[in-house]
Amino acid sequence: MKSFPTRSSVNGSHLRSRLRHLWLLLTTVSPLNPPLAAQETSTSYNIGAVLVDEGPTLDGSLEDVVWQRGTLIDVFIQQEPDEGSPSTERTEVRILHDGETLYLGVFAFDSEPEALTATEMRRDSERILQEDNFQIILDTFRDSRSGYMFVTNPLGAMLDQQVANEGEGGRFGRASSNVNRDWDGVWEVVAKKVPEGWIAEIAIPMITLRFPESEPQSWGINLMRNIGRKNEQAFWSPIPKPYSITRVSLAGTLDNLSSLNRGRDLRITPFVTGGASRIRSAGVTDDALQRDIGMDLKYGVSASLNLDVTINTDFAQAEVDDEQVNLTRFALFYPEKRDFFLENAGQFNVGSVSSFNRLADLFFTRRIGLSDTGETVPIIGGVRLTGKLGRNDIALMDVQTNGVFEESGENFLVARYSRNILTRSKVGALFINKAQTNGTHYNRTYAVDMTLAPHANFTVTGFLAKTETPSISTGDMAGYLNATWLSQSWRIYGEFGDLQDNFNPEVGFLPRRGIRTTKLHVEWNPRPDRWGIRMLSPMYDIMYTTDQQNRLVSRRYHFMNGTVFDNGAYLNIFYNRNYERLDEPFIVRKGVTIVPGAYRYGQLRLSFNSNQARRVYYNLMLAPQTFFDGTRVDMNATLGARVTNQFSAQASYTRNDIDLSAGEFKVHLAAFRVDYALSPTLTLRTLTQYNSLSDQWGTSARLRYTYRPGSDIYVVYDEVRRDPTDPTGLLEFRDRRLMLKASYLLSR
């Protein structure tokens, strides 16, 4: 083993050399295309705000006289399928405000109103984005980076999300850590189908938003209509094809906003919970009654800075995790679903760009209040301060957990600062401190990061980080750099990450450490405009990973071609050629262990997804492959149906057949979802899952009634059945829980 000074010098020199070569590579390919003309600053998409004494009554019609005073927008430009052409269906939008609420009246004319695709009423369902819908994004700070996004459909369904860094990191439906879809703002929608199309009246209270303290002020705004049956997207302020409405740097402006009033900017939400549970472990049954009270508080320290306080925090209403099968050596990622951690979550983000094969997230909220196995750890309380001061973004969080069994409670302090520079660039820093309440263990993470956008199509993102843990003093640093060129026809990026052996962000997500990994991705997006094909996405991707001594440990060549059809269907074919070196035995499952050695194997994958907006849709996947020293076949089938505007169901089945020299086994994963919406404010979702690796069935049912904006009643039932002697797993309850939670929003 080399001494620390020598090793640090070698690693630092190697890291700087790799980062320099990556920068040179990406800057040489950047001239592939000139800047997109649509990205030039335009004054054509400015509208004036109209202040009225009293807003309209929301009743699903636009006959209220006050609507005639609103600013009219009636020209929308296609992005898909015929970029630059007028929308094929007329849309009229009127915008006004009364100081306390922003109102939008939408009349979506349709030449075939009987063909509207609208079957979803549930809040925040992804299906809303695939049907007929109308979308609004507000860049209230006019920083060309962040925004509040609101979506509705002809049934009055609601989806809202916060956007950071223009939502970058997601593409063609991939999730992005910069889009927080689980954020729930307080707003109202009333929608109605009419013979000429559909109407929506939208009311967004000012207290739901954050904005500067100035008079008057201008916000970035963009509007988008999706016509489901035509797979057509049309924008008010045009957006080129590589991007979505989250590209707020291309938004228009809502000017001359004045007399904005957030009241006292205080929201208090007390809640009560009650229920019962039965837990069986090692032949012992534990029955318990549960009852508790708590409170969440939001206070606007200023118009742009928000304080959140949670006391005796309870997440009884959070949805259960989807079951996943892990046949890798590394941890799987599960998304955050708990309310307190969702709002302004993007302001804390420091990590790798892509959520697909993610390399590192330095802050991962599921490390707070959840054990490694997903069990709940009681949270005594927490405080969060987030917002903007001029060009500065500030995010502070402190959370205290209680101890469980013989373990000490823990305190988590997270501090994040970033400053916006130039048009779409920023620099920042992150500090995380995790400490035992009654103990000596601690873990700290220090990081500096940057996002540079010197060109409309070119973005460079990176961070340098160090962790601090008792008894560890060497090899605890990490560096990451990603450079991406994104144009109408090309997506090219390269990235390099160096994660030293002892880099240990205990409050982050790090699947793998002790590696240096380099990745190059080249993707072309031609549009043949024939045979019903809208776009092709042939790509080549290579990932090369070594240990800290530069010895090859993993390599993957990825060849893929995706095909997007005009009817919304998607066909994908790819082949991976893998190399893996095992230095330690890999236990795939109990009784099946792969011995150390070097392995080369290949994976072919074919998948087809029908148009997910149709009443009956399906997904099919088949992946025959070699796997270490044996073979593996993966199969998946999903069938969904929107039976009525209120009722839908989806069933999925995944099977993995593994045959290795050490043994063979099969893995089965099944899930069945039922969604019923009596109205947009009263919804029921049930989810039943089976996982053969854990030999258990799980069922969850969640009823949500929003009896007034911001106030909810939840009834939640969860159960897990398991009996190793019964192949069906239906005989014994392991866990049962029935919970009621009621909250009431008090706003001043």
Image: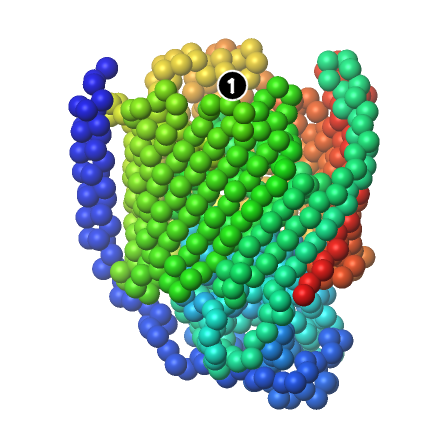
Q: Name the residue nearer the viewer: 666 or 93.
A: 93
Q: Is residue 50 above or below residue 146?
A: below
Q: Name the residue nearer the viewer: 298 or 665.
A: 298
Q: Name the residue nearer the viewer: 735 or 275.
A: 275
Q: How busy is the neighbourhood of tag 1: few (under 14 within 10 Å), some, or many (20 plus)? A: some
Q: Quadrant of the N terminus?
A: top left
Residue 78 visible in the shown view = no
Please provide percent x and percent y for residue 109.
Answer: 64, 78
Q: Is residue 384 left or right of residue 720?
A: left
Please provide percent x and percent y for residue 552.
Answer: 28, 25
Residue kind at label 1, given as amino acid type: Val
Residue 640 visible in the shown view = yes
Q: Given the current orientation, which residue lies at the most extreme front position?
A: 438
Residue at image coords 48%, 30%: 435
Q: Is residue 126 left or right of residue 33?
A: right
Q: Quadrant of residue 746?
A: bottom right
Circle 1 sits on which residue?
588
Q: Is residue 396 left or right of residue 514?
A: right
